[in-house]
Image (tube, rainbow, N blue to C red):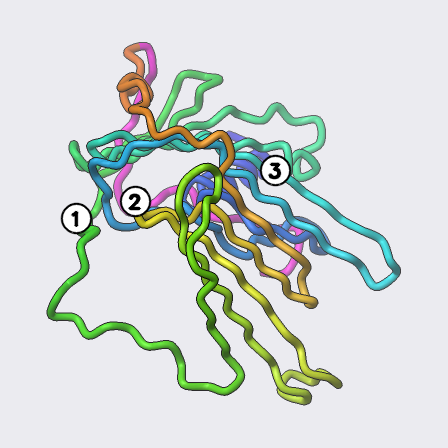
């Protein structure tokens, strides 16, 4: 049986694999996960292979002037068939399990075979589950386009196109203003999000979010290559012991050290 602290790390890594990079803030008794940045599992994209290092930086300034900075890197691969592999770094979670040996993990999504794998690279074990029916990356012509909320407190502007991580990307900035008094705030609060998305690869290559309540989060794909990754990255090695998993993800976020 794994210790609870290690279960937290494994569960957190699963979230990183699904989100491409975590947004984390320390909290009393543990780590609070605020969601994922770019690269989250979505429509299957074929014919657009790439590999990159997804780096997430989180910076928070405390009321006393103290500063918390965390960095996490996830290695991401996608082949021409739409198969993906993510290898999350766990350096940002080291404080969650002092003295524990952290597993080295890899997450493979294979829409061709209709399965996904969670691999423990240290112990050569893993779990396998059946994927739900994949969504197409092509837009549904019968679905009406989404329109942004008609609110004077939300402003969206185009930043045009420029090279980001060596590839063309389209930028958008969204500013959300929380009026004074809406959540007990004495003055208005502005939350600014900036996203740069590659139309060719259909991924976000850079995003920034500044929220005075939680801090700044920046996500960027570094060392981006559009070459076809080795096919062996998407195949489970023969010496791995794999168990079938049914009834959901199986690896869920747990943090019993503080309120949920």
User: Which of labels 3 and 1 is toward the front?
Assistant: 1
Report whether 160 appears left or right of 140: right
Q: Which residues are magenta?
A: 239-260
Q: Nearer the viewer, residue 249 or 133?
A: 133
Residue 252 forms part of the magenta stretch: yes
Q: Residues within 10 Å of mark 1 (few under 14, many from 20)?
A: few
Counting residues from the N terminus, which is met first, the one under dot 3 or under dot 1? 3
| Residue topped by disc 2 | 200
In this picture, is 67 found above or below 157?
Answer: above
> Counting residues from the N terminus, which is met first, the one under dot 2 or under dot 3?
3
Mark 2 near mark 1, Cβ–Cβ under 8 Å? no
The mark lying in front, picked from 2 and 1, is: 2
On the picture, is 59 further left or further right than 203?
right
Residue at the outermost top position: 239
Secondary structure at badge 3 equals: helix
Residue 5 is tagged as: 3
Q: Which of the image's four quarters has the C terminus?
A: bottom right
Name the element at disc 2: loop
For residue 239, above or below residue 244:
above
């Amino acid at each position: 049986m794994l210790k609870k602290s290690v279960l937290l790390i494994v569960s957190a890594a699963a979230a990183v694999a699904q989100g491409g990079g975590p947004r984390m803030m320390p909290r009393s008794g543990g780590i609070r996960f605020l969601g994922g940045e770019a690269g989250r599992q979505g429509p299957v994209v074929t014919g657009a292979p790439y590999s990159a290092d997804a780096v997430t930086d989180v910076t928070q300034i405390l009321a006393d002037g103290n500063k918390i900075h965390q960095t996490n890197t996830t290695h991401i691969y996608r082949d021409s068939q739409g198969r993906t592999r993510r290898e999350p770094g766990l350096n940002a979670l080291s404080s969650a399990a002092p003295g524990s040996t952290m597993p080295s993990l890899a997450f493979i999504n294979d829409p061709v075979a209709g399965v996904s794998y969670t691999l423990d690279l240290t112990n050569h074990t893993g779990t396998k589950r059946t994927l739900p029916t994949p969504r197409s990356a092509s837009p549904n012509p019968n679905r009406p386009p989404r329109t942004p909320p008609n609110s004077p407190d939300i402003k969206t502007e185009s930043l045009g196109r420029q090279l980001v991580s060596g590839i063309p990307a389209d930028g958008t900035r969204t500013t959300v203003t929380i009026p004074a008094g809406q959540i007990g705030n004495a003055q208005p609060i502005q939350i600014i999000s900036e996203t740069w998305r590659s139309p060719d690869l259909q991924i976000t290559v850079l995003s920034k979010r500044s929220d005075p309540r939680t801090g700044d989060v920046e996500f960027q794909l570094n060392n981006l290559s559009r070459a076809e990754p080795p096919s062996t990255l998407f195949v489970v090695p023969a010496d791995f012991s794999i168990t079938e998993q049914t009834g959901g993800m199986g690896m869920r976020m747990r943090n019993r050290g503080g309120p949920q």
